[in-house]
């Protein structure tokens, strides 16, 4: 996976350096974005491709990032800063003044993932969000990675299933709120996250797999 420090020990040291500053309350370099909506579930890319149920994804621990984002009244992004925590945390006082006086900076978090099983194997995406649920899940994942590092394990790459939960908002007009769940089902070492090439299949048993129809979100 991209953007990893030179060695596992370097990565662990960088993560531990900001451990106490990560509490529950770089952009994707051209990668597709992974998103979650109540109506459609998990999708990625401009075509809003549905992720495959049961597919496993590896989270790049070096890409765990924090920052801020700001929107205008018409929901356009007018400010977006995000950087890996291994490079330090952006402080609110360092943020530029927004041209729109009605807008304010909100905290956001994010990280990169790579699919390691199923139809999307090898696909790399960027997930980022500024919701309370995303912030809590980010902190939980971060703390799990730190716990593995402190245990002396070199397997600090979480392998997750994409899931979601929901709850009834205390303000009735907001209805049910959907939040992300990254269900950790295993761990790998940093050096084990590259996708290996598929072995050749003998011609007499080769058979083209049927294409899975994927639902697109309604524009």
Image: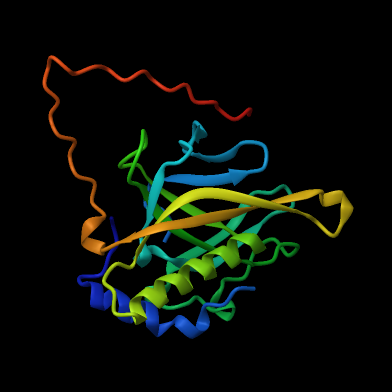
Residue sitting at the far right: 172
Q: Is residue 86 above or below residue 58?
A: below
Quarter of the C terminus within the rendering: top right
Q: Is residue 24 left or right of residue 29?
A: right
Figure colour scheme: rainbow
| 141 over 114 or under it: above or below | below
Picture coordinates of residue 103, whole percent (x, y): 71, 62
Relative to the observer, which residue lies in front, 98 or 140? Answer: 140
The N terminus - image quarter: bottom left
Residue lying at 59% horizontally and 30% vertically, measured from the top left: 217
Q: Residue at x 19, y 44 (%)?
A: 196
Camera-side residue of 47 and 75: 47
Rendered view: 145 above or below 70: below
Count numbered badges in the picture.
0
The percent position of residue 199, horizontal first and vertical second, equals 14, 34
- Does 194 sit left or right of 59 as displayed? left
x then y, percent, for residue 10: 25, 77
In the rendered structure, the answer to whether residue 11 lies left or right of residue 137 reads left
Q: Position of residue 166 (x, y in %)?
A: 70, 51
Residue at the extreme top of the image, as rendered: 204
Q: Quadrant of residue 80?
A: bottom right
Q: Is residue 52 above or below residue 127?
A: above
**Along the line of sight, the residue nearer the viewer: 93 or 67:** 67
Q: Quadrant of residue 70?
A: bottom right
| Image point (43%, 54%), residue name | 160
Quadrant assignment, res 129? bottom right
């Amino acid at each position: 996976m991209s953007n990893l420090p030179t060695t596992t020990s370097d990565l662990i040291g960088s993560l531990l350096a900001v451990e106490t500053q990560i509490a529950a309350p770089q952009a994707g370099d051209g990668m597709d974005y992974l998103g979650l909506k109540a109506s459609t579930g998990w999708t990625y890319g401009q075509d809003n491709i549905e992720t495959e149920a049961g597919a496993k994804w590896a989270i790049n621990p070096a890409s765990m990032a924090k920052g801020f984002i700001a929107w205008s009244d018409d929901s356009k992004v007018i400010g977006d800063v995000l950087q890996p925590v291994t490079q330090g945390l952006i402080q609110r006082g360092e943020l530029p003044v927004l041209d729109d006086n009605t807008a304010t900076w909100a905290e956001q978090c994010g990280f990169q993932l790579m699919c390691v099983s199923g139809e999307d194997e090898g696909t790399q995406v960027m997930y980022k969000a500024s919701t309370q649920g995303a912030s809590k899940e980010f902190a939980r994942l971060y703390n799990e990675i730190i716990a593995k590092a402190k245990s002396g394990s070199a397997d600090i790459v979480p392998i997750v299933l994409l899931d979601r939960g929901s709850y009834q908002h205390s303000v009735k007009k907001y209805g049910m709120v959907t939040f992300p769940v990254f269900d950790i089902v295993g761990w790998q070492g940093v050096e084990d996250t590259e996708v290996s090439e598929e072995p050749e299949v003998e011609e007499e048993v080769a058979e083209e797999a049927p294409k899975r129809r994927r639902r697109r979100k309604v524009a």
